[in-house]
Amino acid sequence: MEKDAKALSELRLEIDGETENLDREKGEAFIDEAGFKQIIQTDGQKSCNLFLVGEVENKIVGFSRCEGNDLKRFAHKLEFGVCVMQKYWGYGIGKNLLKQSINWADLHAIKKMTLTVLETNEKAIELYKNLGFEMEGILKQDKRLSDGNYYNTIVMGRINE
């Protein structure tokens, strides 16, 4: 809901600083409260988008987003992304957000879900495989992390038969 925009902005900034599994470093591509309000409004109006939050004791600790495409040639698919505060890893929050997103996509006749994941994020890769995603490709030396080394990004997809 729009009332969650400020909390989402603060949460995203915090999560970006906790791990290198995501695309951004802390503060990069910052989305302020107004920006999140716009995303929430857009996702509420577009039938091919879904924005979910994970809460613990009425506090948002993670969120996921499915973003579709208005172009006819890509209208059958969407991209999925998820992030959860590190303090709440291992409790199934990300898994539940993904399961809900898969159910929603299947109900809305979405043929394909895609996502990208850093090659070192083995727990996430295993989760995605367990929920029907397959590796579709590798973007070689796609990300440079704080250790100065380059890492691959894995492209995964799930096709709803």
Image (cartoon, rainbow, N blue to C red):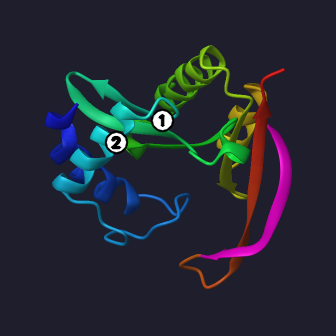
| Residue highlighted by disc 1 | 49
Q: Is residue 36 left or right of residue 117?
A: left
Q: Position of residue 38 (x, y in %)?
A: 26, 48
Mark on residue 96?
A: none
Q: Which residues are magenta?
A: 133-144
State which quadrant residue 120 falls in.
bottom right
The residue singled out by tag 2 in the image is 42
The answer to whether marks 1 and 2 mark residues whose Cβ atoms lie closer than 8 Å is yes
Q: 151 or 23: nearer the eye? A: 23
Q: Residue at x 47, y 39 (%)?
A: 65
Q: Position of residue 129 (x, y in %)?
A: 78, 33
Compared with residue 2, is residue 104 higher up or lower down, i.e. above or below? Answer: above
Please determine whether, in this image, residue 148 is positioned above or below residue 124.
Answer: below
Quadrant where the C terminus sits is top right
Residue at (46% x, 38% y) in the render: 64
In the rendered image, residue 65 lying in the magenta stretch gets the answer no
- Across and down, in percent, residue 41 comes to 28, 39
> What secondary structure is the magenta-colored segment mainly?
strand
- Callout 2, which amino acid? Thr
